[in-house]
Structure formats: structure tokens, C-alpha cells
Amino acid sequence: MPASRIGAVTQASPPTEAKSSESYDLNTESVASPESISPCAITPSPGLRKSKRLTVLHDNQVKPVNAAVAVSHGQKRKRGEEKGEAVIESPTKPKFTRRGDCSKEADSSMIYSKIEETSEERKEKDNEIEKTIHQIPQRRSKEIKVEEEISENEATTVVRAKGSDIKTEKKVNSEGTKKIKKKRRTKEEKEADAMPLAARTNGLRMFVGAHVSGAKGVQNSVTNAVHIGGNAFAMFLKSQRKWENPPLQDDHCQQFRHNCGQHSYDKSRHILPHGSYLVNLAQEDTEKAAQAYNAFLDDLKRCEALSIALYNFHPGWTGSAPRSSAISRIASALNRAHAASHTVVPVLEAMAGSGNVIGSTFEDLRDIIDLVENKARIGVCIDTCHIFAAGYDLRSPEAFRGTMQKFDDVVGLKFLKALHINDSKAPLASHRDLHQNIGLGFLGLRAFHNVMNEKRFEDLPLILETPIDHKDENGKAIEDRSVWTKEIKMLEKLIGMDADGEEFKDMEKELSSKGADDRKMFADAFDKKKLKEKKAAEKGQARLNFGPKE
């Protein structure tokens, strides 16, 4: 092992031959003679087995030395006791043992002999020591994580994890060898990252924001919302990719509430946490249903700890069960959760309708609400992309008014608590949940002009979930939060704008042109799918009419 792995201990190689009457230089300390060392004094102390290493000094005392790379003393002691030997371990790889009985009456002329190690044994011990090194220092394990992230993003030349001050530069030489250089961000770089991309607009009745990151603590979601200039925001309260998560930290909750007050975010109206994608309250399996309910209730408890009043979630999917029984299980779980919590209002998200997903029709949402006992603690979130893909048109003023009237008739506008603002990459009634940036998709800018000028949407959180990744010159996807900033300002600008004026028409034309290629690609794919389904239906009908072919 290199000396650097052992810290400040200086290693000195022992003589190639052991002698019985001459002194040795062990760890820069001398041993006058073998006779001057008491064999029992060099037995490892049980209290030092875990993390200490022993070096014999000239005054018969045992000196503990940093031993992050040492193998367990318990194993060494056991080997020595089995052979009746007293083991002295030097910092170097060769080991010296005193043969004979470990007693005060031991012969003073005992001979030291060198234990030869084969290359295989040394390699095995090196591997064991290497494992010990990786397990001990926390700071090193963090660096390894960074290196793994780099290996997954080979095209990236500069990498910095969110919330980290370490910036990693990766260079590839002419031979293809990668050289990694890490350096800490400067004060100027930190300040530039913290500066808002745009100031928040005050005095509006429409509260537009985006689903921001809460990485490194839920309190950071507030500063991320300020950074993009949003007047509302959504976030995950924990990882949405796993079932088990650590609880919220008290200082994070306190800081979250402080940040909301400092930046004037209304926690009861304009913050909309999003539930885990793993949770399915319609689950028929008893064990899985309990797991989903516990995760759901845990989120409600987190909302209450943060003084948040709204919580958005996907209703679920039926599996192989009938739709009516799946809806009944969702409502039953909501009633249980209401009894186990106090203030939070669960908000059902309208879905696009792919597969056996529940919530793609206004009737699904109505049926769930009808079975909920406490109507004051249930709501609905309309996702513009989802309901468009489900078949509800929003594009023209007439279509928009018709859709909203149907929602009011079936569900009731009093249950509308929030909106997700997304354009759609897929056509009307495609049942595809594919979000697109505002004005680039099949909804078009006019649909969002209708939304932003709807009086009944005032004071609701309007949350963008549009894509913000773009590819750099190397083809690597990079997150660009300024996309949200531009869309927030554009949506706010639509308030009161004349849809027949030149300004709006120029904006609409520019955005439509920018998204034309994507729309054509998805339209062609949708048409092919419909044609395939039509042929399959006709073939199936023909077999029903004439029976199977001979």
C-alpha cells in the first residue's frame, strides 16, 4: 500500500534477515534488543482492536497508531494464540513473530524469524485493506459518488451536483484517457447561481409557477421558486422512486416555513406538493394496498408539518379489477386518511387515460368524490395536457367554455383547487401523457390565453410541468430553468392581451413554427396507431361474422 493511504505514519522496510541480537528500525523507533521486550507487553489490548494498530517501542510500551487500513486485531490475536505466538505487527507488510510461550519465564534468546508472504497472499491482504479504506472515510465515499455520476455522463465537460460547491472538469486527451479535475466554485459563481433569473410579478390574481426541486432539503424548494420568478410552486416531499424515506428534519421544516413567510408564499393556497408515482390507492392486493396507503398518509403528515394545505396525487389504476371497485377502494383510502390527519386537502389529478388509469374522465373524478365523506377535504387538479389527451378540447374560446361547463356540470367547479399548465405533444384524444412547452404543441398558445383570462382560475396555483432539458453540442441533456422563467412571464403577459391583436398573433405564429416538426412527427405516429387499431378491429369483426379461417 502507498504510504499516503496510512496518513502521517512513516514506513521503514525491515532488514531482509532477522537477527537475534541486533536492533531493528520499526516505524522510526528502535528496539534495543529482543531480550529487553516483555513478550506479554506486546499482546494487543482488546479495547484497541477496532481501529488501532500497535508498534513496539524501546521502553516496552505499546504505541497506538492510526489504523484505517489495518486488518482486524482480533483475527491477528487469534492466529497468534493458536500458535502460541506473540505477534508484533510493523507498519510494513513483512511480519515478525516471537516463537515460544508468551510467559514471563520465556527464554530471552528467542529468535525472531520473518514470515514470508507469497504474492497471492499480499494481493489478498491488499484487497482487504482497500475495502477497509472505502468503508471508513465519509468524505471519500462522497467523492466516489461524484466519479460514478461522471462516468454516466461521459459527454459532460463540467459537472456539479445540485447543492454542491465542487465543480468537476473532465478532459479527454488524444489517447482517449480521461483526466478528472475537481475544484471548488468561486464566491462569484455561487452568487450568480443564487440570483433570480427574473423578479416575481406582484399584484396579479393569477399565481403561476413550476414544479421545482426540493433536493438537499424541502426548504430549498422555496428559493428555487424565487429563482425562476414563480408566484406558486410544486415539489416532491420525498423521493418518488422508493417506498422508504427518512423523515423530515425539524430544522428543514422550520426553515421552509420561514422562507415562505420571507418571500410571501401562501402555504395554504399556492403550494401544491406532488405525490409519489408509486402510490396506487386502487390497489387490490392487501399487502400492496397497505404499503400504498402508508406512503400516502406519510405525505399528508409531511404537509401538515410544513403547514401546507393542498396535496396533489394520481388517483391510481384498476389492474385486473372492475373500475367501480377500484374507485371504491380509492375513496375508502381517502376516508381513512382524513380520519388519520387534520387539515390537508388531497387533490385528485385529472389523467390522460392511457391503459387502465383512473381519472381520465370527469365521471371518474365525480364518482370518487361522491364516496368521500368529508367533501370539504377533497379537490381536483386539471392538467391541461392530460384532459386534452383524454378528449376535452381547450383550444378555441368556444371549446374552452364547453369543457369548463361540462366539468362544472359533472364534477363541480367548487372542487377545482389547482391546474397543471402544459402543452401536449400528442393530438386531441390521443390518451398519451406527453408534455410540451407552452405554444409548441397541439394545444397552442390560444388555449393558454383562454386559461390565463379565466376569472374562475384566479387565486389558484397554476403549475408548469413543461420540459426544461435541452441538448448541448455533445448531445448531452442539460437542465435549463430559464425555460420556466420565460414561460411564466409569457403566461402572465397573456392576461388581458387582445387575442386578435398583432402582438398575440406574432407570438402564436413564432411558437407554432418552432414546434411544427414535433407536431408532425407525433401526428404521423398517432395516425399510424389509429390505422393499425382500425384494421385490427375490422379483422376481429370479420372473424366474428364468418368464423376463423380454415
Image (cartoon, rainbow, N blue to C red):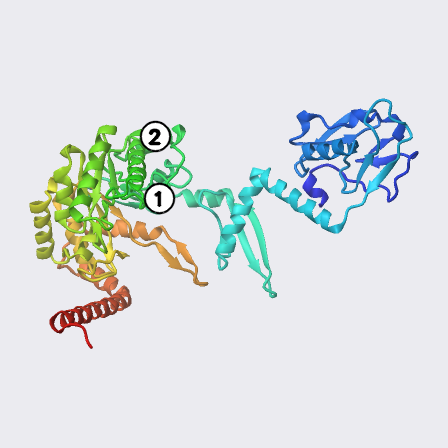
Foreground pick, 264 / 539: 539
Q: Is residue 429 left or right of residue 210?
A: left
Seen at 27% across and 38% down, the residue is: 271
User: Based on the displayed image, in which of its 4 quarters is residue 394 positioned?
Assistant: bottom left
Location of residue 518 (image quadrant): bottom left
User: What is the three-letter code of the residue carrying label 2?
Assistant: His
Query: Which residue is disc 2 drawn over?
Result: 258
Mark 1: secondary structure: loop
Q: Is residue 445 above or below residue 294?
A: below
Residue 341 shows in this picture: no
**Quick check: 122 above or below 516?**
above
Pick the residue in front: 212 or 139: 139
Q: Position of residue 378 (x, y in %)?
A: 18, 37
Position in image of residue 98 (x %, y %):
83, 33
Three-letter amino acid code at the position of disc 1 = Gln
Q: Quadrant of the C terminus?
A: bottom left
| The furthest residue to the bottom | 550
